[in-house]
Image: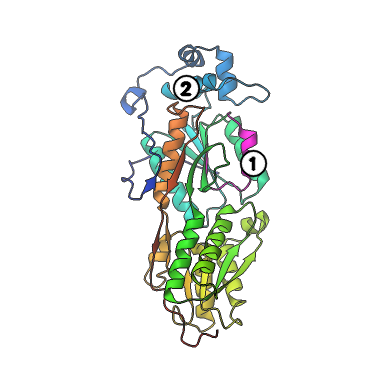
Amino acid sequence: MTAHTGGASPPANAGKYTRVSVKEEKMTVDGENRKTAKKATLTDVARMAGVSPATVSMILNGREGVSFAEETIKGVMAAAAKLNYGQGRRGKAAMGGGPVILIVVPNVTNTYYATIIQAIQQAAAEKNYTSCICTTYRSLESELAAVQLAQSTGMAGIIFTMLAHPDEVLSRVGRKIPVVVMGDRRVDLNVDTVELNNYDAGSLIAQHMCELGHKHMAYISTTLDASNTIRVQRLKGLQSTISRLCPEGSLLVKSRNITPEVELNNLLIEHTVGHELARSCFDDKKITAFIAVNDMVAYGVMDAVLDAGFSIPGDYSVCGFDNLLPSNFGKVALTTVEHYIQDKGHNALDLLHARVSGQLSNRNITRVEISHRLIARSSTGAPRASQTE
């Protein structure tokens, strides 16, 4: 786990999002006043919230076995945020600074999650939050341990950049600590979310490939199961659109189950999966295009195609999802789906801050839906002339 303290202000958001805007709120205690102002006490928070110090202590520390009215919790959290109070721990880093939030990610080797982390920290710096990072490798035990860590150390809130086991984890969290979940569009999660319609994103890629003339394609993915709805929804969008636009076409699905232990111990697992599964498709001469579940897997697919002596896009077209930084490089030039990763991180922090500071009612949840668009580069083109029907 690493800690990061806020520095310079980040640049303005460059992406787009729809449906919900979260109002920003500056911390009550500014940098100049903090040097001379008297530190708030538990009694100060209790007085402002109109409750007993014992109630404040139990709410801020997420004590098990007790429950309070939502308005009481909201009042205490708002008072604590306004007074910049941490009870010696809640919202205070060991090295000093503002409230502490926990950023939970599956791994840090995928550039997508590294970018999300930095985007969250950019927004956190503006609001005087310190962040800690916890990796889970999609393990339920690790996700629950992250919740316990945040609650036991009195952190201000949690941002899950991907939550593999939402039902089990969110039932444990309840209303004890503010949480924001990033991921696929889901209406069944009773929590604040920053989400992407991955079904539509998959459909967008399928439309692009069909318009180029591809009929027989392969979808290359890591684990496809209920814990990975993003991957599954992208696949469903592909299948539905290909069936509609090209009824005579086909989509071969190739996936490999990756355990948390494998994800932890293999730094190149996504590239490896892309490379090996793509190689297994070369004997099927009908296939003219590969659609990878994300850009990291797509890089492995591209290497497999080139290592086998084929060309891109002359022999095989390749596309991914995420528009990671390397996808822009001239020698890569990967066709992919842009969904404004930096904005996602900024919006997640803004949403968490609004919840922590009491701007949002506990009777409501907020969903931010990020827009997306196709970026067509030179990794996709018309299918090879020798395609076998």
**In this view of the protein, which residue sits in the foreground, 262 or 74?**
74
The residue located at (55%, 24%) in the rendering is: 60
The residue located at (64%, 35%) in the rendering is: 171
**In this view of the protein, which residue sits in the foreground, 388 or 10?**
388
Percent of width and height locating residue 239:
55, 65
Q: In the picture shown, does residue 3 fall above or below 377? A: above
Percent of width and height locating residue 115:
44, 52
Which region is colored magenta?
159-175
* Residue type at the position of mark 2: Ala
The residue located at (35%, 20%) in the rendering is: 36
Name the residue tied to disc 1. 167
Percent of width and height locating residue 32:
31, 26
Percent of width and height locating residue 137:
61, 52
The residue carrying pointer 2 sits among few (fewer than 14), some (14 to 19) or many (20 or more) residues within 10 Å by Cα, namely many
Any magenta on residue 163? yes
* Residue type at the position of mark 1: Asp
Name the residue tied to disc 2. 80
